[in-house]
Image (cartoon, helix red, strand yellow):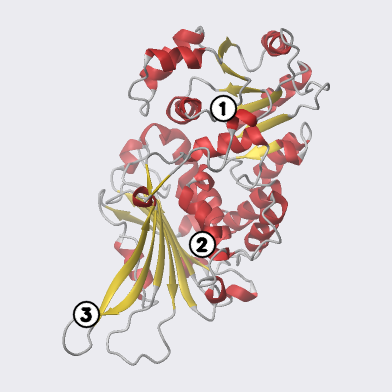
Amino acid sequence: MSKYDFHHLKYGQSLPPTILTIFGATGDLSADYLIPALLHMDEHNLLPKTFKLVCVGRRPLEAKSYLDFILKKSHVIKKLSGAKKRQFLKYLIYYQGNFKEIKDFKNLTKILSDQDRPQHVCYNRLFYFATNPQQFESLTTILKQAGLLIACQAHERKVRVLVEKPFGSNLKSAQSLNKLLLSFFQEEQIYRIDHYAGKETVQNLMVLRFANSLFEPLWNNRFIDHVEISVLEKDGVGGRINFYDRTGAIKDFLQNHILQMLALIAMDEPYNLTAEFIRNEKLKVLQALETLTAEKLPLRLIKGQYESYAKEAGGKSKTETFFALKMYVNLPRWRGVPFYLRTGKRLSKKLTQISIHFREPIRCLFDGCAANVLTLQIQPNESVHLLINNKIPGFGIKLHHGNLDFSYEMAFKGEIPGAYERLLLDFMEGDQRLFIRSDEIEAAWKFVDSITESSLFKKLPLRFYKSGSNGPKESEEFMKKDTKKWWAK
């Protein structure tokens, strides 16, 4: 068995001097994902040799009390040794400031500039907006007014910004956000994150397709019957109820995670592995998504809501916590191939899975032939499975349907980098391949708007389902009418 080597792909120590400034440093995202990712990267020497982390929040804290606050707040970090804590504190600067006060940002300018002076180091300046998108405008405006968007010129250092989702709530708002950011930054400076892109199995999609002669010749409508993408969640909405009730499952998951996975499945082979060519191919897929007309929408979409949701939302609510959608990609490779997409809260299990269903043999010599199915499990156990037909030992010929399995956990003993670790490292390196370009965002929202802004959308019936179930029964019937069934269970 192979052991995963954290230095196999990246060498953080070779990165140029870097200052990473996180806005929203006391929030759940920082506590559960960003700080744990940076601690883990530090443990494996993946941070730049010359590195500073500036955490900006409104709480009156210092570096040590901030780290103690994060350790207490985090649901991920179980314990941290004194030695590791002291090591991490060498990088850490905590800055208390108001995102709307120019005087606070001028003080921050002095702090960042002071890091350059002692040893005449010029740092790359990286800004992580781990805040509500409504704060992006004030942040970027004041950053510019405070002179923080000008990097050290002596060594051609860079300024970059990373923004969290949700990136807009519809096409119009996404275009406004893009216009805002592009008025302060060039496209190559902007990193729009979708943490699903950092998961190993999602990244493995391109390797699986383009590095194996077995699959790519069959990756088209001649051999593939249909594709399923299921994102099943066991938990409810939790503390996101105010945001979620304004958003719903379609805007929360379809626009980003699911459509990004679909784009990787359906894209053509890029000319090379640079960010530009990969994103160009993904964009072609997103622009080719078939618009759902008023006639098609009732036949292609099921909306659901778990039974206790309205009470959690404080009364009546028509927000969907589940959807099942049938759609098509209008490209020659995929003509006539349905894509079945599904996500929901309060379901029986937590499971994210992509399954590629190949056509059954046109003529099978044996009784009981089953279609081959390639399954990529994204979470909880990152793995790949190929369903094939085999002979059952014994007299006569009877078929057994079994999997050829590949498990990351089994094949690579030890720890595997988390999604945020990979994305943070790519951000530091200036690698945009796993980040989303502005035209991709807008193409995805254009398709989602064709659903959510349709006059029929709110009139579609809301199908209720029990917590811990597989969703509304109508979603099962939805597949049966096409003589299919959901593969992810």
Left or right: where does residue 320 sit relative to residue 135? left
From the image, tell me which residue sits under label 2.
208
- Give the mark, 3 or 1, whose residue is nearer the N terminus: 1
List the residue tagged with mark 1.
47
Height in image: 174 above or below 144? Answer: below
The residue lying at 38 percent from left, 69 percent from top is 478
* Residue kind at label 3, given as amino acid type: Ile
Q: Left of 27 or right of it: where is 448?
A: right
Q: Given the image, on which type of amino acid does mark 1 rest? A: Leu
Q: Classify residue 482 as left or right of residue 166.
A: left
Q: CA distance from mark 3 to mark 1?
A: 52 Å
* Residue 131: percent from left, percent from top: 56, 27
Q: Quadrant of residue 289?
A: bottom right
> On the image, numbered disc 3 is attached to which residue?
392
Q: Is residue 69 visible?
A: no
Q: Earlier in the sequence, mark 2 or mark 3?
A: 2
**Nearest the eye: 330 or 137:** 330
What quarter of the picture does the C terminus occupy?
bottom left
User: How far apart are labels 2 and 3 at the CA level?
Assistant: 29 Å
- At horizontal 32% and vertical 78% (from top left) the residue drawn is 389
